[in-house]
């Protein structure tokens, strides 16, 4: 039996060590709740989007605690070229080298364009970005992303913002088995139990936004996700017990009954 | 005339990019600027003069997933 040392359990992305495996989104809720959500989530990484600036005195960066790694996404990009442009502008905004590639041609289902995502990943990895591509869970694409320099892969569980959970379960399992990169389940995770399931499957981390943003109490839901992700990770590290497909397996001794 | 974030704007120079950001109420420490398709590094905002017909994109972070 192996002993699990939780303190040694770090997630490495682009040479940076993270102890949290919960990547928090910042969309669709009040800036004023971000600090509480980040703190309750124990998050060390938060996603952002880049848009045309509004003349304003306050900016989301004013609300994010220091030492939290910023992960700008390339949402709005319809092809690799636009994703590269957004990533470069994000870096100039002072967010560091991390980028989550999102390329979508489809505004109904918001499914990622895997082909354009590979192209953008290759260009940005060569420019020194830590590239974390959002992708449809396809093994061949995952291999291509790894070969062109992705730091992780972020397969979707179900459509963005749907809170439907891990509908792509079997395909994410294949990626976890076959790809030697952190597999971060992104999109569609709607409940702590689903985040926990992703971690039990061996996902390296979970990214969630809408599940938190649409909760009744945002900071408390952030904490619920933190606990679920930690529980799932511990379960994965400790090794899940086997399943008995037919019949039962007694937990109590089958000897010494009072009727014997 | 300038085009700033897709909108036409009267221009009577001289004016640097940094000065324009100030006039329009943008925070230079929270924005990135692209001029005619090229990113202007933050350190060069003060030294970059605008010219008639320049096209600017001024961007900043917002919440997102």
Image: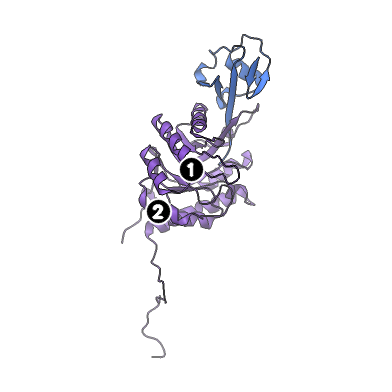
Chain colours: A purple, B blue
Picture coordinates of residue B4 (x, y %)?
63, 21
Residue drawn at 52 percent across, 38 percent down: A103
Residue drawn at 66 percent across, 14 percent down: B1
Picture coordinates of residue A18 (x, y %)?
42, 43
Picture coordinates of residue A89 (x, y %)?
52, 27
Picture coordinates of residue A115 (x, y %)?
46, 40
Q: In this view, does A196 lie to the left or right of A244?
A: right
Label 1: chain?
Answer: A
The residue that label 2 is drawn on is A174
Hey, which quadrant is residue B6 in on the image?
top right
Residue furthest left as drawn: A1
The residue that label 1 is drawn on is A134
Front position in the image: A159 or A58 = A159
Front position in the image: A133 or A120 = A120
Residue furthest top as drawn: B14
Q: Is residue A49 left or right of residue A99?
A: right
Residue drawn at 42 percent across, 31 percent down: A123
**Nearest to N terminus: mark 2 or mark 1:** 1
Front position in the image: A193 or A189 = A189
Alpha carbon separation for disc pair 2 and 1: 16 Å
Q: Is residue A122 left or right of residue A23?
A: left
A68 above or below B32? below
A168 above or below A83? below
Q: Can residue A68 be seen in this view?
A: no
Tag 2–tag 1 contact (CB < 8 Å): no
Q: Quadrant of the C terminus of chain A?
A: bottom left
């Amino acid at each position: 039996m192996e002993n699990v040392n939780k303190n040694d359990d770090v997630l490495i992305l682009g040479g940076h060590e993270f102890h949290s495996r919960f990547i928090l989104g910042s969309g669709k809720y009040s800036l004023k709740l971000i600090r509480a959500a980040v703190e309750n989530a124990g998050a060390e990484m938060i996603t952002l989007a880049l848009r045309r600036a509004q003349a304003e005195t306050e900016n989301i960066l004013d609300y994010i605690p220091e030492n939290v790694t910023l992960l700008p996404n390339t949402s709005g990009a319809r092809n690799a070229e636009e994703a590269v442009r957004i990533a470069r502008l994000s870096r100039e905004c002072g967010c560091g080298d991390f980028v989550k590639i999102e390329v979508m041609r489809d505004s109904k289902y918001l499914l990622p364009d895997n082909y354009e995502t590979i192209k953008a990943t290759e260009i940005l990895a060569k420019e020194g970005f830590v590239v974390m591509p959002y992708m449809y869970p396809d093994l061949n694409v995952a291999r291509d992303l790894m070969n062109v320099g992705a730091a992780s892969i972020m397969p979707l569980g179900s459509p963005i913002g749907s809170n439907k959970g891990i509908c792509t379960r079997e395909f994410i399992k294949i990626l976890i088995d076959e790809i030697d990169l952190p597999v971060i389940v992104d999109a569609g995770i709607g409940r702590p139990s689903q985040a926990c399931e992703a971690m039990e499957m061996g996902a390296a981390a979970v990214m969630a936004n809408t599940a938190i943003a649409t909760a009744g109490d945002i900071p408390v839901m952030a904490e619920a996700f933190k606990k679920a992700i930690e529980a799932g990770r511990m379960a994965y590290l400790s090794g899940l017990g086997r399943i008995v497909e037919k019949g039962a397996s007694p937990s109590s001794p089958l000897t010494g009954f009072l009727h014997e | 005339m300038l085009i700033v974030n897709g909108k036409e704007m009267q221009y009577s120079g001289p004016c640097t990019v940094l000065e324009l950001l100030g006039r329009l109420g943008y925070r230079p420490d929270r924005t990135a600027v692209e001029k005619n398709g090229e990113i202007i590094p933050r350190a060069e905002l003060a030294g970059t003069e605008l010219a008639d017909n320049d096209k600017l994109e001024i961007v900043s972070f917002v919440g997102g997933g």
